[in-house]
Image (cartoon, rainbow, N blue to C red):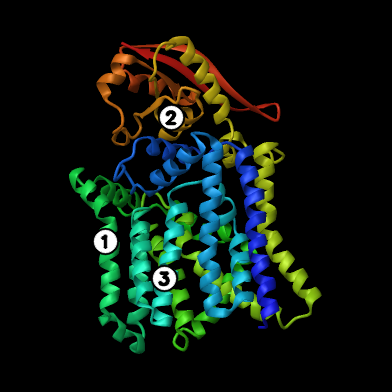
Amino acid sequence: MNRSNDLFYLRAFYGLLLIHFLVWFSLGMILDLHPDTADHWVWSRYLSWGYYEHPPMIAWVIRLFTILLGNRQLALAFASQVITLMSLLPVFLLARKMFGTRAAFWSALSLEATPLILVGSMIFVIDTVLILFFLWAALGFWKGFAEGNKKAYYWAGLALGLAFLSKITAVLFPLACFVFLLVSEKRRSLLANFHLYGALILSLVVFSPFLFWNMQHEWISVKAQLEKGLTGGRDWNQTLGFWFGQPLIIGPVLFYFAVKALWEGRQKFKLEARFAYLLILTIIPILFFGLASFRGKYSDPAWTDIGWPFGAILLGNYFSERLSTVPAKKALIVGGLIFLTSWMPIGMMAWQALSPFIPVPVQNDRTLEMRGWRELGAAMGREYTRYFPENEQVFVVAEEYQVAAAVSFYSPQHPVPYSFGKEKRNFWVIREELQKKGALMVCRPENCENNLQRVQTLFEQTRFVSTAPFYRGGQLAKEFRIYHCFN
């Protein structure tokens, strides 16, 4: 490919990044924070080397952006888009090294067309930072392998350590690298390379503070992950949800072409290391979490998000080769249809969240996960002013930690959240202080009776205060009840 074409696709890539940022940052500011993002914001207020279920990286990153931009939605929406764009960059660079600039652009565009990335870029969670460091580790390892660059191995080791500090499932990366070297007799000799082990040791050194913290807390994070992912018993709904969820998070039409690209890559698996590397990095997370779905009590199809970016590179190469041999008009039509099938449902979801047009019962409408929290926070804020006018520190109690976190973020007082659904998470709360000062409890009407019984273990008295409704399109979409709890 000539230099002018390279420059064209390079500019197109940066244009893609700009469009992504403008569109999804704007939508992220219009919608409310996802309650999981609000929960991680709570973590950032109480920095630690570890938390109940996960390592600390997401909390550190959020803390950095809130120091720069303040404790407001702007900081988290901006952070989410910046981290997403920084994750698309190693995809482009790795694809460029392997297949050229044209294929690199198609790789980034393919990934950009998936609900996994588009919707995921608005929900700033643990996997957002995991993907970032996982991809940079993959780029570093490939540079070390393909170019004989010893320093690149150590950069990969550093990125892997940061990935470990993001989520424990980063362990799948060294596993994939080991398989990549083991399956080829030609590559197997590299298993004796000292620098690979030096890089792995570096990653463990970076990870060691979290391991030390867990050792002091009875390995609470590791146990939580094993309980959720491997010890729940067989649940066929979870298993089917995982496997049938893969076409949904990629987009059905794009998934069809991704499977074709993977199949063609399989034919070159033994001949070219680049295809073997990408195939292994794609397949191992799918197989690992797919097999775990037969045993875990909870399984999310989006957990394969660390594998599909490498499948997108294979897909980008597939599109680059196929569309270069067809007339431009046909290429435009085919490409447009492929990406519209992914972008259209995402646009419909955004429309549904803002102005519902699909007659879905509110209890089944997942778009409501990012609506109504501002209104609840404002209602809670008014009650804190009424019941705790002099208190510098106030508390919110809820069964669901996500609800407590959303109230903590959106209430002007930023109350300290306490969840009695998962009490192990509440390490930032001194129970005696909570009982002494009192709190506001928030609950969904259908759960309030059970919540009132449970909150009696904390407080002697509860008093109904008010109801906080949220209306969307003139219809009641959410409702919460607020109680004053005290001794």
Determine the CA span between mark 3 and mark 2: 40 Å
- Image position, residue 170 (x, y; %): 36, 60
- Image position, residue 250 (x, y; %): 57, 61
Amino acid type at mark 2: Ala
Secondary element at image label 3: helix
Q: Quadrant of the N terminus?
A: bottom right
Determine the CA span between mark 1 and mark 3: 17 Å
Which residue is the site of mark 1?
204
398 vs 142: above or below: above
Determine the CA span between mark 2 and mark 1: 34 Å
Amino acid type at mark 1: Leu
- Image position, residue 323 (x, y; %): 70, 78
Which residue is the site of mark 2?
404
Q: Which residue is drawn at the image coordinates 34% and 57% (left, top)? A: 164
147 vs 30: above or below: below
Residue 140 is labelled as 3
